[in-house]
Image (tube, rainbow, N blue to C red):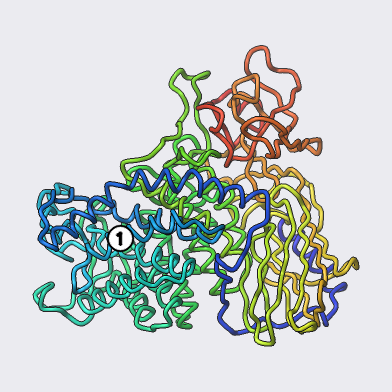
Amino acid sequence: MKKLTYLLTVGAFMLTACSPSMDKPESTEVLKPIAFQEVQLQDSFWLPRLKTQKEVLVPFALEKVRPAMDNLRKTGNYLKGIKDELPFPHRFVASDLYKVMEGAAYLLTLEKDPVLEQRMDSIINLIADAQQPDGYLYEAHETGVSKYHEHWGGGGMGDKPYSFVVHSHELYNMGHMYEAAVAYYQATGKDKWLKIAEKSARHINHVFFEGDPNYNNGKPVNQAPGHEEIELALVKLYRATGDTLYLNMAKRFIDIRGVTYQPNGEGVMAPSYAQQHLPVREQREAVGHAVRAAYLYSGMADVMAQTGDTTLAPALDSIWTNIVDTRMHITGGLGAVHGIEGFGPEYVLPNKEAYNETCAAVGNVLFNYRMFLAEKDAKYIDVAEVALYNNVLAGVNLDGNRFFYVNPLEAEGSNESGQGAVGRSPWFGTACCPSNLARLVPQVSGMMYAHTSDEIYCTLYAGNKTTIPLAEGAVRIEQQTNYPYDETIRFRITPEKGEQTFAMRFRIPTWTGAQFVPGDLYDYADNLSASYSLTLNGKRISAAVHKGFVTLYRTWKANDEVTLHLPMPVHYSTAIEQVKDDHGRLCVTRGPLVYCAEAVDNEAPVSSYYISPSESALVKRETIGKLKGIDFVEVPAQSVAEGYGTETRLTMIPYYAWDNRGDDAMIVWLSGSPEVAKAK
């Protein structure tokens, strides 16, 4: 009822205040994102992270994936008849290399780096040498070492190419290679790797959908991969080259999923594990391995947007609703259940035992951004933003060299249990998470704007400048803000022709309303409210919100200025009754950020504190130490620990910044009463 009342009140105000000349009907054109290399970051939040990635994370990760390079070199030598050791058998180590290279490609747009570019070119030469003349590329099968790979009864790779598509990762690896090749082409203009990717894609199309006498006895394989990824990668390849073959391939892999093949077993061979239990258009709930699922849904949204195939919409809309209404942590984390790294039953969202793989949060960002491109609704950006600023960024420390695979919402520290907290790792045997971080963070600039022929959508906010090509002429935009900590975003808009009529659409995030993130799971428990404001050249403007955007449709002139103010009070959220793990608990947020209490900042054990919604929360920007420049929040609190029962203040930091000052105790969902705190 609270949410409905808020919406009716805002709606009534907007209807009376709206000027018709400020609005414009939504275009039916396909939205085009402004690519990463076209947006120059100038902010204090993302730009330093990119520099850390370039100076620390990517060089560090490239060293960690050196074994994958060695495998490529050994495979190339094998194909040339050069005596060398054989590669070690592994299903997906190559994908980690490709993801790190994708991240490196994005970072080449920050500044010229001949050394990094030369290193990339040398690795690309290894890839070219390891690819068979017909386009096939999978080191273990090319060299015959797959027979030494014991996994799931010896069937981890199959005994020959494409004989165990459900788990071999042959197509998954190629998907990540395609994405990286496209990124390198966009960043440098060099097309050698792009041609390698196209050769692979044409080979896969021939083998899977036409038939090749050298594979599967000449019969088309006609099976969707067990680990999705190639679907969305093929769409990227299509957009980079304009070749509709790749778009048609993506659609075909989606169309045959759960139709031509369904596994019959349990665990990783269960039909639902890789979303093969039903044809995709009949699926209505998020099930199985969360990363695979998110990649599938991303590919489906891409295909829907690019082909106009709206028969995918009912499934996508239902699955998205199922996620945000029943299966998503407030941090944007997906896949709460260990074991299958996936979705559990509805409303099972544990805190200390949460899985929330970093890769799943990356997938959540990719899925929701693509849903926005397909449906032009800001609610998808709102979910992507929450997943990005919270679960994704928590996956890597501020120094860029230690990582989380699992992202719990509560952790014990050595000062409480003697066992230490979860702790970050410098790498993992399965290194999908750090390599995914290497490639996602540099992509963020490519998610900030999208356009049609006469509309510009402003989606993620950060200091930057770009030029957007509209039908009547290019438009320069400069954005200034210290988001996500400061409330004001300023835009300077300049049509290159001097004057031009078009629509600017600005996102009004869900967290400015009655809840932190879309869906039925979480609502604000406090009564704090403050309306956003919009000014044009210093004059306040009232504009209706439609699908999460306010629109200014007018004739723009050089250096027109728009200021968007998004108030960021400290909010307290509750979860709905069905989420048993959050009964009687409160989550503190500000703007798009979830906050947590960490032991290093507080005297009593953090799990002993209890709080209630308060208007006296304080926001303080840290000026020293590892968390310099980050906004801390202090909220009134009490503790049930002996000797700490008096009124005090609990210090909280953004969730993404925890475990940067040692492995310590942490909690997101704080007790709302002494009874709940004592029950811990």
Residue 472 against residue 272 in the figure, above or below: below
Indicate the position of residue 431 as horizontal and vertical percent values: 35, 46
Residue 74 visible? The answer is: yes
Quadrant in which residue 337 is drawn: top left
Q: Nearer the viewer, residue 221 or 616?
A: 221
Residue 38 against residue 603 in the figure, above or below: below
Which residue is label 1 attached to? 173
Residue 581 visible? The answer is: no
Q: Residue furthest front?
A: 114
Q: Nearer the viewer, residue 325 or 169?
A: 169
Q: Give left or right: position of 351 versus 675.
A: left
Q: Quadrant of the N terminus?
A: bottom right
Residue drawn at the location 70% of the way across and 69% of the way down: 549
Residue drawn at the location 78% of the way across and 55% of the way down: 488
Circle 1 SS class: helix
Q: Nearer the viewer, residue 31 or 444?
A: 444
